[in-house]
Image (cartoon, helix red, strand yellow):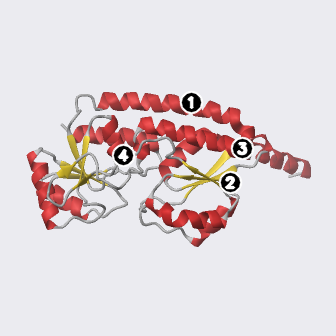
Amino acid sequence: MTKRLAFIYCALFLLFASPCGAASLSVTMSVAPLKYFAEQIGGDRVNVTVMVPAGASPATYEPKPRQMAALSDAKLFIAIGVPFERAWLPRMRSANPKMVVVKALAGIELMRMAAHHHDGSFAGEEHDGISDPHVWTSPAAAKSLSSTILSALIQVDPAGSSEYQKNYNRLVEGIDALDSDLRHLLEGKRGTKFLVYHPSWGYFARDYGLVQIPVELEGKEPGPRELAEVIRMAKKDGITVVFAQPQFSEKSARIVADAIDGELVMADPMSEDWANNLREVARSIKQALR
């Protein structure tokens, strides 16, 4: 290869790898679903990194030293209110004082985590005192998240504002279409209950008129008494599916599923493929509620 051809190839690589010659904006966030919104809005202008890897729990995760070191390059951190942020966000700020930290929950009215109580009664709606950060399971709340991310990207990269706005508008159209699909899928199911191990689907349930009932007790493995009460309730309501997720043990969920002659189905609220994941979960819930 001649020096001239080598120069041309290198120039083309740089042109297409970094649009308009601009370096990618380094954006870090806590959980994978947020990556979907940041990449949809940011396009080729952003390079998005997720702190909590697939299968790990954002309640207990501890970032690796290499992740903390990589934060030195981040221009923007999107926080969502998951538990590990309370311990680690101050350290992240110390690792990169120039990094802009944005709280994606701004402007969203938070629900409380669903729970059942020690007396065996169920609060299929809320548990006092513990805010539920899983707002992205609601397409309506996802639009608010996206608006916050749009503003944050424009703040740290004003030159990309027109591109970000265009991408955001396209994203919102897609979210509205998804919401329409989910309402059609779950039509006629209002007021029905579905059983989950961990109460991650409260906003989804609220949007579509469903009631999630958790197996776990206030974030802890249920004891024999609580499991017996869950099994009794499930049999009474004709529930035959228990939804579990990779971030938590399947042990208790499987005990309940076996006791009701039911099925254990995985429904991961932390999936990076946000839109397709919500469609799949809606289909699974519709099938379970037949």
Q: Quadrant of the C terminus?
A: top left
Ranked by sequence position, the earlier of labels 4 and 2 is 2
User: Tag 2: Cα neighbours inside 10 Å, few (<14), some, or many (≥20)?
Assistant: some
For badge 2, the amino acid type reads Lys
- For residue 42, the mark is none
Q: Mark 1 — residue?
A: 170
Q: Mark 4 — residue?
A: 111
- Disc 4 or disc 2, which is closer to the eye? 4
- Between residue 19 and residue 40, name the one nearer to us: 40
- Residue 122 in the image, given as x and y percentages of width and height: 18, 51
What is the number of callouts on the image? 4
- Residue 111 in the image, given as x and y percentages of width and height: 36, 46
For badge 4, the amino acid type reads Met
For residue 46, above or below residue 206: below
Ranked by sequence position, the earlier of labels 2 and 1 is 2
- Residue 151 in the image, given as x and y percentages of width and height: 62, 40
Q: Mark 3 — residue?
A: 157
Ranked by sequence position, the earlier of labels 2 and 3 is 2
* Mark 2, secondary structure of its residue: loop
* Mark 4, secondary structure of its residue: loop
User: Tag 3: Cα neighbours inside 10 Å, few (<14), some, or many (≥20)?
Assistant: some
Q: CA distance from mark 3 to mark 1?
A: 19 Å
- Between residue 18 and residue 89, name the one nearer to us: 89
In this rendering, would 23 be left or right of 46?
Answer: right
Tell me which residue sits at (65%, 43%) in the image.
153
Ranked by sequence position, the earlier of labels 3 and 1 is 3
In contact (CB < 8 Å): disc 2 and disc 3: yes
Q: CA distance from mark 4 to mark 2?
A: 30 Å
Tell me which residue sits at (38%, 52%) in the image.
131
Q: Mark 2 — residue?
A: 75
